[in-house]
Image (cartoon, rainbow, N blue to C red):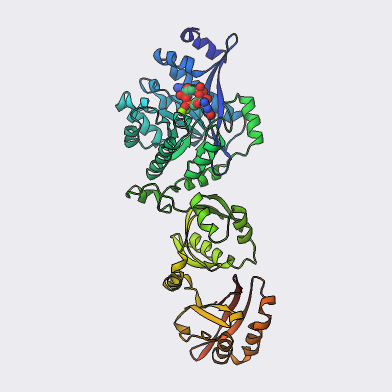
Amino acid sequence: MDFVNSFEEALSKGYIKAYFQPLTRAITGKVCGAEALARWDDPELGLIPPGDFIGQLEKHRLIHKLDLAMLENVCRFYQQNDCKDMTFSINLSRVDFVKTDMFQEINKILSKYDVPVKTIHLEITESTMLTNQEYTRKLFDQFKDAGFSVWMDDFGSGYSSMNVLKDYKFDMLKIDRSLLTKFDLRSKKIISSIVNMAKALGIHTLSEGVETEEQLSYLRNIGCEVIQGYYFAKPMCEDDFLAYLETHKVETESDFDFWNDAGKVNFLSGDPLMASNDLANSDEMLGTAPLALIEYFNGLITYPYLNTAYIKEISKLGYYSTEQIEHDINDEHYVYRDLFMRQIENTIHRGSIQKTDNIMNEVVYSFSTKLVASNGDRHLIATTVRVIDSERSDYMVLKYSQSLYATYDLVTKITPDKDSAVQIYSNAGFSKIYGTASLSRGITEFAATEVHPDDRDRYLAFFDLATLNERVIHFIQQSFRVRNGDDYTMKNIRISKLENGNYLYTIQSY
Ligand code: C2E
Ligand code: MG
Ligand code: MG
């Protein structure tokens, strides 16, 4: 078929249409955009793929008309279907950058349909950047300055992808599907290196041509943000795409910004909480640091992402699944909830990385958190966890107790069955050690010397070792007046159940 001579007619008769292929956010599974792909629907020949006619249109300098027609299609679709949250990417040809003033032409269409600039993403391949470089640079800068998001298409398919990346600040790298076709160890390493590099440069990543569950879960685990491919959907005609949008969740605009910020976290980094700006200045290599993302919204904690290393760490604390952690942490009676929530609140309000060292089920672990995105009272926190070697735990407890229990006056592990107590931390106000030799003696001594006379009986009843086991399900707590120099101050005293007949006894100021 002579595409060149039939082109104008086909265009005017509406034979050339945009097909839409959804882009899916790897972490949430929500639709976060769509790519418009040209299809020539000939009444006699049927559906002709772009590979058949694009070359000829480029050769005859007609391709810009196709690209603008696709944009017009997208804009009309946007206007007619009231999909204000959707974003669309269109493909621009190398030849578009030769003569036509694409910047002006594109803006004309956007104003005609009243479509905001941020709705449209422009896909350009490396070959574009290498032809007519001076003019290309000018156009690229014009688009970027006007607020367009400019994506690099087919990354890794050509010879000079790296060079182009060095010179142009793209918003998104679309990893070419040829890298995924043979999905073996080597290809996985290349892909994870690309993702790692993109994060270091502050560029978002998308994988094209994702067809299998295995590819999806690998890409998700290494932090590739967006997925396009037959696994989710093939390019669809308008009606099918509309039906798809009816049955699939679409990201709202604020969702989009939220997860876009989250995308800056490098899941592969040895120090994943490092800001992408800092990363650019470090020689960080691929690592296997534990990383999870915690979402805090409406008082509820969820874990949208945990990498394999994180799961391995928390299994040492007795956790094996996201559901299990979410269940416990959202339970008001969960013994470690207060400590956890305090750290979350601090992370949100202080803005800096928060690190605490804690004990859970007799395992010492350190827990770091950093706020990566906020939208009103919805927050996303990146976190790492490291269990501290059990052989070294005593040493570590001492070493870390200072920061761990900074908010406590006293922390003691007690074992009623053995009548023993081990003081883990005490601040200056409690320099004297109670109950090291005998727990029961420690209790009476403490009551006699530290507790306000009017509170003594209640304190001794609270601490009644004979009934402790039946009274404490998760923890018990009461307030007592405790000596503070010559005076008394109200303190919160808590006994929390640990494993194996152990309890944690803590005194906390208000
Ligand atoms: P592209 O921009 O890289 O588009 C992605 C191509 O990969 C599309 O092919 C899409 O159908 C295909 N694809 C998506 N997911 C999968 C998958 O899971 N498996 C496989 N095997 N393929 C998948 P399509 O539509 O044939 O387009 C081919 C190329 O033609 C596009 O590659 C783009 O470079 C170009 N093109 C398409 N429409 C236009 C257009 O309007 N203007 C310009 N200048 N180029 C266009
Ligand atoms: Mg493309
Ligand atoms: Mg591509």
- Quadrant assignment for the C terminus: bottom right
The structure residue drawn at horizontal position 57% and vertical position 84%, both measured from the top left corner, is 439
In the image, taking residue 106 as reference, residue 240 lies left or right, namely right
Q: Is residue 77 above or below residue 479?
A: above
Q: Residue 133, percent across and down? A: 30, 26
Toward the left, the furthest residue is 134
Q: Which quadrant holds residue 59?
A: top left
Q: Residue 257, percent across and down? A: 51, 44
- Counting labels gives 0
In the image, taking residue 213 as reference, residue 3 lies left or right, namely left
In the image, taking residue 308 as reference, residue 498 lies left or right, namely right
Query: Can residue 120 be seen in the rendering of this structure?
Result: yes
The structure residue drawn at horizontal position 37% and vertical position 31%, both measured from the top left corner, is 140
The structure residue drawn at horizontal position 45% and vertical position 33%, both measured from the top left corner, is 174
156 or 437, nearer to the observer: 437
365 or 348, nearer to the observer: 365
